[in-house]
Amino acid sequence: MTMGGFGFQWHITWRCPGRCAHCYQSGTESAAELTVKELLRIADHIMGAIPGPVTINITGGEPLLYQNQGVSRGVFELMKYLSTFDNLDELNIITSTAGMDQDAILELKALPKLAYVKVSLESGDRELNDDIRWRGHYEMTLGNIRELTKAGLQVIIMTTLSKRNYQSVAGLCALAKNLGTSGVIFERFVPLGRGAVGMCDSVLTAMEWREVLGAIAYAAGVVVGELLPYKAFWVDGTTARGAPCCLGPGSMALMPDGTVYPCRRVPIPVGKLPDDGMDRILATLGGYSSMPQKCFDFDF
């Protein structure tokens, strides 16, 4: 996990097999995708403009379903290309595991700078998880996590907490340990897109967030006071690493059409790649900074 430099989420596709209740997408987004060639051109713009270490989280939609002009699973072509840059410090993929098979696992295994496969799961309870995501997601995902860890890949479970599943913290921490993963990232539901329509009343209250902090503190063996400054957490065994809001010059969200947001939860366009150029976008974001960033890039 890079604690300095520049980090961002790259949403390469809107495609997704499910209609998760908390999804940031509205369902009205254009299905058009950039070609692999265009993605590689954007990669050149980004990596050429930032001298310091860069952390990239490839996501979607479901990135394993990206395909354009007959190129199936172009996500791996992009990730291989990103791995050739000396200033790439860390590469991750955020996935529901839909579309994952042994070929995909081998492709991931071959990436020299892949740090983590971040897998979406909302609860250790199958019915609750599938109610938030889609029927069959729980069994599919657990099976794929087992295959990923068997292959020697580092997996982190990612969870979006709302009123529907905020009491799942302890169970998810135990499940993550049993599956041999590198823990769980917990973040809070923000009502955008589909989630703003179907779950607008599911944002955690202060008391519910306090309950979450208590469960995280217990799982990690720390006191609640140590967690108060942070907005999200990565709980791994007996450690809880907190992340403040990463809005600022060291982070962004890159959407499937090249539009750049300051954050996926702040959908205000600040430019478009490659048309506007990365230098101009960095200036709009506030100027590139080498100050430490602790953004885990949770979106999925």
Image (cartoon, grey):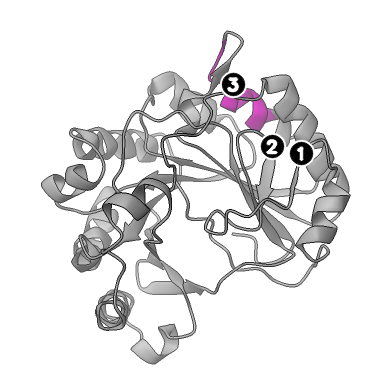
Tell me the residue that label 3 is attached to.
Answer: 74
Q: Using residue 176 as the reference point, say whether residue 103 is left or right of it.
A: right
Residue to which mark 2 is pinned: 258
Q: Amino acid at mark 1?
A: Leu
Identify which residue is drawn at 65% across, 58% down.
262
Q: Residues within 10 Å of mark 1 (few under 14, many from 20)?
A: many
x, y percent for residue 207: 26, 83
**Is 21 on the left or on the right of 259, as rendered?**
left
Identify the residue under disc 1: 273
- Residue 90, given in percent of the width and then of the height, sits at 64, 49
Which residue sits at x=45%, y=28%? 15
* CA distance for labels 1 and 3: 19 Å
The secondary structure type at the circle numbered 1 is loop
Q: Marks 1 and 2, Cα distance to the nearest angstrom?
A: 5 Å
Precedes in sequence: disc 3 or disc 2: 3
Do the CB atoms of the residues marked 1 and 2 lie less than 8 Å apart?
yes
